[in-house]
Amino acid sequence: MKALVVGAGRMGRAIAYDLLRQADVESLTLADRLERSVSSTVDWLERQLPGVRTRVRQAVLDARDEQAALSLATGHTVVVSASSYELNLGLTRAAIAARAGFVDLGGNNTVVDAQLALDRQVKDAGLVVVPDCGLAPGMVSLLAADGIGRLDATESVAIRVGGLPLEPRPPLDYQLVFSVRGLTNEYLEPAVVVRDGRICRVESLTELEELEFPPPLGRLEAFQTSGGCSTLPHTYEGKVKRLDYKTIRYPGHCVKIRTLLELGLLSATPVTVGAVTVPPRDVVEAVLERILPQEGPDVALVRVVVEGTVKGTRRSLTYEMIDRADPATGLSAMARATGFPAAVIAWMIGTGQVRERGALPQERCVPPGPFIEALTNRGLAVTVREA
């Protein structure tokens, strides 16, 4: 297979690294609008995988230019977007025109809906497009699907995910591990959930709860945020009574972000200050990008609890993953936990393990068993406890 990875940042680096470790990947094109980002990542890849440079092509691409993306994608088996979610629809169209499969990290329900609306076009081309393939949205959808598939009837699915610094620093005890716009987007849009078997929406930054993880993490908090469920509510509406997703943070984070929201500091409505008119959200994001740490050891946390019955007997399945930064490669826990799942699905598409055709949610086309096995082979160990 031949892969094109668009975006040479943290996540694109992890995706390229994982794909190039697979013998099935004949070649990989790495593209970004910044030439220095591409060359820096290729230099890093060569240090991690000596000799791999001969399998890598470097390209400069403005992903907003669909015609340029089409030209670059032509001849590839699969395209993986590690770019901002705002670019994914155009890249999807370019991949379809180039007769290539497509995978992205997603994160925005409106964009994903527009991608899935291309289902007939993708089917007619004999391709598969799978959005939302990172950590959450992403991996957790297949863990949930695996659990639901093991039960005769499912009552509830509770998905809890977080990326945290191991050395938290005030005021937010948070480390910026992906784009700041993606972060604030999770806090602002409503969360789509299933309650009493029906889809509904609840405000983000609500329904605060406590949960425990092994030391040194201890007591943490979780609260509603958007996007993490991806298409799960639509796939399982009427089949499960309750399904939701909450983001894990250190205690006190939620109330601080909620204060910013209530003060209007996350509003996209411009305000005029002196001679300058600017949306408060843009200012806050610029400040967060400047003051939040972006380096340091981190941990990615996943806990998915699926409850229901088997032959009339109650059963509970708990899927858990705790992954830490890899000092050998320098990849953060969140880069591994986000990039590797996307790379696995791209690899499964390229090697024919995803047999369905169309623009589809991963829980409807990716077999969860082989996916979880592939994650384990890459060092992302998911444990399953049954009760």
Image (tube, helix red, strand yellow):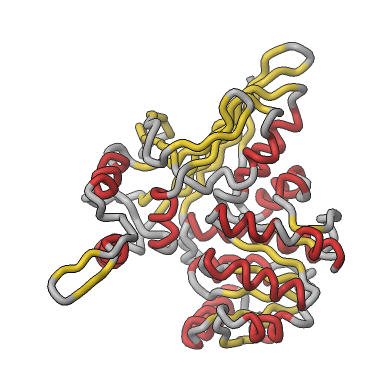
Residue 231, image quadrant: top right
Q: Residue at x 25, y 49 (%)?
A: 260
Q: Quadrant of the C terminus?
A: top right
Please tell me how many numbered marks the rendered image carries.
0
Q: Residue at x 64, y 80 (%)?
A: 66
Q: Quadrant of the N terminus?
A: bottom right
In depth, the one of 245 and 304 nearer the eye is 245
- The extreme top residue here reads 312
53 vs 153, left or right, is left
Residue 98 visible in the current orientation: yes
Task: Give the answer, above or below, for where 84 lies relative to 65.
Answer: above
Q: Where does residue 149 sit, x and y in percent of width and height?
A: 75, 32
In depth, the one of 329 and 354 nearer the eye is 354
Task: Give the answer, above or below, for where 46 lies relative to 359.
Answer: below
Task: Give the answer, above or below, for where 187 lies relative to 155.
Answer: below
Residue 341 visible in the current orientation: no
Q: Residue at x 51, y 83 (%)?
A: 33
Q: Where does residue 247 sit, x and y in percent of width and height?
A: 44, 42
Q: Where does residue 382 sit, x and y in percent of width and height?
A: 61, 41
210 vs 334, left or right, is left
Q: Where does residue 106 sit, x and y in percent of width and height?
A: 57, 58
Q: Residue at x 25, y 55 (%)?
A: 265
Task: Give the answer, above or below, for where 240 lies relative to 226.
Answer: above
In depth, the one of 254 and 52 nearer the eye is 254
Residue 297, image quadrant: bottom left
